[in-house]
Amino acid sequence: MSKAVRVFMAISLITFGVMYFYWPYLKMVFATSAYYTEKDKAEYAFYTPDLFKKMPRIAYDYTYEYGSVSGPEATVFTVRYHGVVDTTRIEGYLTSSGYRREPVCDVQADCWRSQKTSDIVTVIRYRDPGSVVLQIYRSPYN
């Protein structure tokens, strides 16, 4: 084998090795949506905002979602708690984190804002079936 072929094969092997190692991360970077739980360690660490990571868990059954709304400009982070409707602990946590309830919300929910961020936190209660959905809407235009 000529030296050029060996160099090409070595570079190709290194390139494929790097791509194989970083492929899960690249998939997360370019994903437009994701559905995961706290057990999915890579997705949880990558997508979940600190506000949700530190938030008290109000149910044992909960899932996370991530979505890109309009390209890279706006994102929505969601946590769904199943089998509960009481949001007292969540409201206390948001208040202690510097958020305040907005007097008016664009949807039938409670909207919370903080002066520290431009995020809008929405707390939605569904009675039938009982569940609580929290969303963080993050956009540079808020």
Image (cartoon, rainbow, N blue to C red):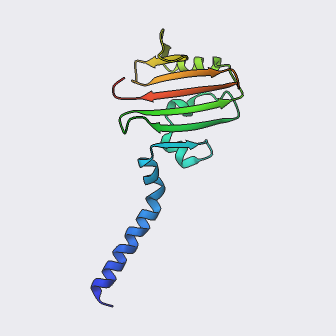
Above or below — where is 133 with respect to 98? Answer: below
- Pick the front one: 106 or 82: 106
- Residue 74 locus on image (x, y percent): 39, 33
Question: Among all residues in the image, which is located at the extreme bottom?
Answer: 1
Q: Quadrant of the C terminus?
A: top left
Residue drawn at x 38%, y 29% as measured from the top left: 139
- Residue 3 locus on image (x, y percent): 29, 86
Q: Quadrant of the N terminus?
A: bottom left
- Residue 76 locus on image (x, y percent): 47, 32
Question: Among all residues in the image, which is located at the extreme top?
Answer: 103
Based on the displayed image, in which of its 4 quarters is residue 5 positioned? bottom left
Above or below — where is 58 with respect to 33? Answer: above
Question: Among all residues in the image, which is located at the extreme left?
Answer: 4
Residue drawn at x 72%, y 28% as measured from the top left: 83
- Pick the front one: 86 or 41: 86
Residue drawn at x 54%, y 20% as measured from the top left: 94
Q: Could you tell me how many numbered marks the image carries?
A: 0
Based on the displayed image, in which of its 4 quarters is residue 58 positioned? top right
Above or below — where is 19 with respect to 135? Answer: below
- Residue 140 locus on image (x, y percent): 34, 28
Left or right of residue 137: residue 132: right
